[in-house]
Image (cartoon, grey):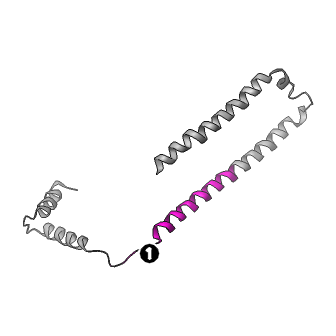
Amino acid sequence: MKLEDEEIQNKIEQGLAETSADAQAYLHVFKVLKKDPEFNLPIQFADRLVSLIEKKEEKKDYYWLAVGILLSVVSLIVAIVLVAERWSINAFSFLSSNVGLVVFGILFVALLQWIDKKIVRKQLESHNH
């Protein structure tokens, strides 16, 4: 918006007379904007709008869930194909000698999930509302 336009708007809002064509156009716009619209939104309009947005978000969640499952299955198939030739009963023998590392890994992942659930998501929810 040009400075001239702002000056014209300010003068009209202050009630000062303006005779230019731009001023007359602004006066007309202001007059039209003061009128209430001739239509009313249905009472449940906001509720329906929110439910539509929630459904869209839910569909998006299912989409990403399907993508995650598909990628997991593809990864499992690739892993089986790559390991099938060298598979033996001793393939995971390192787990028995590194029990502490396995327990730490499981606890670490559980801690990350707890932090996400209790802290991160609550902050996101409070920020969105």
Outermost residue toward the right in this view: 89
Which picture quadrant has residue 107?
A: top right
Q: Is residue 30 left or right of residue 103?
A: left
Which picture quadrant has residue 75?
A: top right
Specify the amino acid type for callout 1: Pro
Q: Residue at x 56, y 44 (%)?
A: 121
Q: Is residue 93 magenta?
A: no
Read off the residue under disc 1.
42
How many numbered callouts? 1
Viewer-closest of 56 and 77: 56
Outermost residue toward the top in this view: 97
Residue 78 position, x and y percent, is 80, 41
Q: Is residue 64 magenta?
A: yes
Q: Residue at x 73, y 31 (%)?
A: 106
Residue 84 position, x and y percent, is 88, 37
Residue 115 position, x and y percent, is 60, 36
Up the image or down, 107 lies above or below 71; here it is: above
Up the image or down, 86 lies above or below 26; here it is: above
Q: Is residue 30 left or right of residue 98?
A: left
Q: Residue at x 13, y 57 (%)?
A: 7
Up the image or down, 66 lies above or below 114; here it is: below
Q: Residue at x 55, y 60 (%)?
A: 54
The secondary structure that dominates the magenta segment is helix
The segment highlighted magenta reads 38-67
Q: Is residue 78 left or right of residue 48?
A: right
Viewer-closest of 8 and 61: 61
Q: Is residue 86 left or right of residue 62?
A: right
